[in-house]
Amino acid sequence: MAEEFVTIRELGRYAGRIVRVRGWLYGRRSGGKIVFLQIRDGTGICQAVVEASAGPAFQLAATLPQETSLVIRGAVRSDQRAPGGWEVAVSDLEILQANEGYPITRKPHGIDFLMSHRHLWLRSRRPTAILRIRHTLIKACRDFLDQRGFTLVDTPILVPGAGEDVQTLFPVDYFGERVYLTQTGQLYLECACMALGKVYCFGPTFRAEKSKTRRHLTEFWMLEPEVAFAELEEIMELAEDLVCHIVRTVLSAHADDLTLLGRALEPLQGVQKPFPRLTYTEAVEILRGERTRQRLEAEIVEARRRLQNCVDELPRLEAQLAAVKQPAQREKLGNRIAELRETIADLEQELAVRPEHLRLAQTFEWGKDLGGSDETILSREFDRPVFITHYPREAKAFYMKRSAADPRTVLNMDLLAPEGYGEIIGGSQREEDLEALTQAMIEKQIRPEEYQWYLDLRRFGSVPHSGFGLGLERTLAWLCGLRHVREAIPFPRTLGRIYP
């Protein structure tokens, strides 16, 4: 039978047969008359064994630089010690391209270096695992809505005005006219839901926020469903079902990837309906409460203890590294030292801001929007996502419907992910009354004459309708247990970073 090109994922189907595999050299080690190659092809990593008896292939294998592109030929055989349980006994090896000096080596690298080499860092195991989970997350979101009768509607990226806060618009010159990069597809989706009933968009959105927190990107992706005739309670149930679905799907497909990332699976396995629900007013009471003060003060004490332990451990590890000569041990110690330094930096930053977060929580004034630190405090109170509803009108967007029960508030919800990850979904019932919406726009200093197309929805067949936006990167960061949302997108755009 003719030899076949196979992917690494398929190796188990070809046990005992001669195959050819195309890929890149991920790692190499030698042991006398044998060379072990780790080869990746995008579907997985396999071990390729090249013995001295392979002749020219052995000579080539012993000198290959990292990330050489190549083709190997050999027999597939079982080895439970190898990645995936299968390896290839190489008889022939063809180099497609080889070049010394690949910048991302096995030694520890700082995050700045890795982000500047993001185009190459994507080849490493951690980013690859995250991208696989991102793919599954996107598919799970779309499958969920498609199966419930939603229609995908693509909304504009270039828009004439604000969909959210006018202060975070990115201006663009459009043939001499100033337009903006979209903040949300929502306003256009409202048009589409009046035609199709249940619709959604999924695409990039942009916010010119001058923020450097671990939750912020200037370019990110959002899934936004919009439903005609739906009120707030219905859209909350939709969000709840969606989150449960994506958690189940990711756990089922990516337990190994999550484990590689160091993500504990138990918190995700506990994500089940019903999610806790708090009003904004109840959330404020928690922030101001004595229990919150005591917990935050205890966390500060614990962070100081952990920091001191790390500071004490660092010189001991550095002394061990100086004494060790064996490359594998040096690599292991070097990685541990790099992790320890990163932990020290994180703890120092945490201790610098935590007292201020405590002060802000204890003095929180009703009427303000919840900040990132407030959301973190609240989400740590629960073991699953929590809804916060009925925010003050002045803190939210002009299109949110005023509550009849308390006109100071609107019919909205934010869904906060547990473990301190904060808001992953924001949504509301939309104001369907023309007069009320026009007045809200004026109060928010938005010119109604520039939104006549949007107001037309309230003039011709207006109905109650609701929707929400799920931030893809924040959701992925929570699912993967990532420290920073910048890892959740292939090429992050943040304040001060546009390269590569």
Image (cartoon, rainbow, N blue to C red):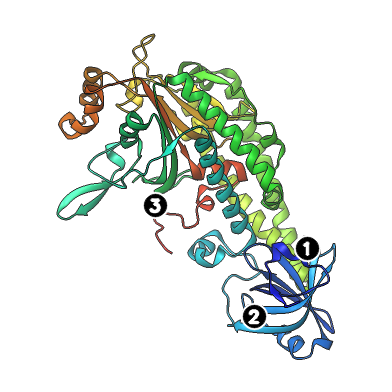
- Distance, label 2 to label 1, CA atoms, is 28 Å
Amino acid type at mark 3: Leu
Q: Which percent across, then down, holds residue 425? A: 48, 33
Dot 2 or dot 1: first in sequence order is 1
Dot 2 or dot 3: first in sequence order is 2
- Distance, label 1 to label 3, CA atoms, is 46 Å
Q: Label 2: how many residues lie within 10 Å, few (<14), some (14-19) or many (20+)?
A: some
Q: Which percent across, then down, holds residue 247? A: 62, 38
In this orientation, which residue lies closer to the viewer: 356 or 34?
Answer: 34
Residue found 80% across the figure and 65% down from its top: 86
For residue 283, above or below residue 90: above
Q: Are marks 2 and 3 in contact (CB under 8 Å)?
A: no
Q: Which residue is mark 3?
A: 495
Q: Which residue is mark 1?
A: 12
In front: mark 2 or mark 1?
Answer: 1
Residue found 55% across the figure and 37% down from its top: 421
Is residue 349 found left or right of 320 in the rendered image? left
Amino acid type at mark 2: Pro
Residue found 63% across the figure and 55% down from its top: 129
Q: Which residue is mark 2?
A: 65
For residue 299, above or below residue 129: above
In the picture, the quarter occupied by the C terminus is bottom left
In the picture, the quarter occupied by the N terminus is bottom right
Q: Is residue 418 visible?
A: no
Q: Is residue 292 visible?
A: yes
